[in-house]
Each structure stands twice: as structure tokens, then as C-alpha cells.
Image (spheres, rainbow, N blue to C red):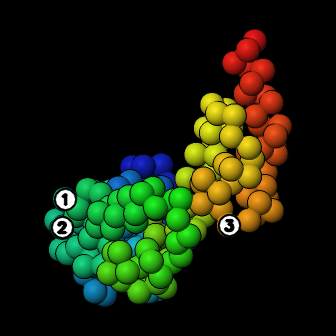
Amino acid sequence: METEAKFTFDEMWEKILDCDRKYDGLFFTCVKTTKIYCRPSCRSRKPKKRNVEFCFSIEEAERHGFRACKRCQPEIEKSPYVEFTQQVVDFLTGHYQQKIGLDEVAAYVGMSPSYVDRLFKQETGETPRSYLEKIRIDKAAYLLASTSLTNLEICLETGFQSTSHFYKVFRQQKRQSPGEYRKEKGERRNG
């Protein structure tokens, strides 16, 4: 069965099994037994394949008698967790120089650490820790390219607790060492 969005039933089924957020808004999963429709990324328990049909708009789903899922809230244009995600990002951005862990982030948003970790990963594709490391490495890259601070000073300035961890994460994200990065950026500035 070819659909309006050029997806087959089986392709859409695979997307809901994967909870793939990239397809949110392109189609909606309608469960015949519960009369509820969801986003493809909904984390609710998956229905039996035979109890599913797909619609390509909220209007179509509601016209067929389905109502919106309370968990994924498909009738809201953006994810219901946009505000939560923004709070976590703001906290991480504002505190990247400090030693912070999941407990501090969770206390800030008023949720349990495990729920914050799971929900943030669901919304962004990464954990708060990996997101924090990206913020720190971006800041370190900026400082390497624009200041004469030593690597150790930059490591400490950006909130890393050990130089070995700083070097490891920098190399993972930038595919080169801090020294190589600084040299490359210096050559570009002077060239």
C-alpha cells in the first residue's frame, strides 16, 4: 500500500518501532483498539501491528474518531518537552565551568536524575553529560583559537576536572588534539 507521503505501511511501522522523531508530523499512528493517535516517536507501549492504521494529518485522524495521546501530545506542534529541554540546556550553558552532575541538573528542573537523563536523550539524542561536554569543547575550541591561554588553563576554564579527559573528549569531538587545533586555526588567521 503506497501512502500520500510515499511510505509503505511497513516503513511507517518500522519508524514507530524505532520511535524515530524525524518522522513526527509526517504521519500519525492510529490504534484501532484504543482509538488514540500518536506521533511516530511516542514512547508508549507499541500496539499489535494488526491494530494500527496510519493517518497523514491530525484532522484525518480525528475525522476517523481518534483522539490525541496524552503522553506524546501529537496535537501540539512542537514536542511537549521543549520547555524542559530548554531549561536543561540553559542550566548546562550557564554552569559549564563548574563541576556538575546529573543530580544538580535534576534538582534544577525538579525531576529525578534517571528521568532527566532518559527524557533529555529522547528529546536531543544525547545525554546531559555528552551535551555538557560539547558545550565545554566548543568553548575550549574558541579559547584555543582566540587566546594564548595554555591547554591546562583552558581545560580548567571550561570545567574539565582532568587534562587527560579534556584531551580525550577534545580529540573525539574535533578529530585532533588541542595543540593541532590551535596550530590549524593560527595558520588560518595568519594566512
Amino acid carrying label 2: it is Glu
Residue 71, visible in the rendered structure:
yes
Foreground pick, 128 / 160: 160
Q: Quadrant of residue 58?
A: bottom left
Residue visible at 60% across and 53% down in the picture: 157
Local secondary structure at mark 3: loop
What residue did someone put label 3 on?
161
Mark 1, other Cα within 10 Å: few <14 / some 14–19 / many ≥20: few
Q: Which mark is residue 62?
A: 2
Foreground pick, 72 / 106: 106
Distance from disc 2 to disc 3, alpha carbons, whole Å, reads 53 Å
Q: Position of residue 74 (x, y in %)?
A: 28, 66
Mark 3, other Cα within 10 Å: few <14 / some 14–19 / many ≥20: some
Q: Which mark is residue 87?
A: none
Foreground pick, 135 / 156: 156
Q: Earlier in the sequence, mark 3 or mark 1?
A: 1
On-image quarter of the C terminus: top right
Amino acid carrying label 3: it is Gln
**Outermost residue toward the top in this view:** 191
Name the mark nearer the viewer: 3 or 1.
Answer: 3
Distance from disc 2 to disc 1, alpha carbons, whole Å, reads 5 Å
Q: Is residue 174 above or below residue 22?
A: above
What residue did someone put label 1 on?
59
Q: Is residue 164 above or below residue 6?
A: below
Q: Is residue 117 above or below residue 89?
A: below
Residue visible at 68% across and 50% down in the picture: 153
Residue 54, visible in the rendered structure:
no
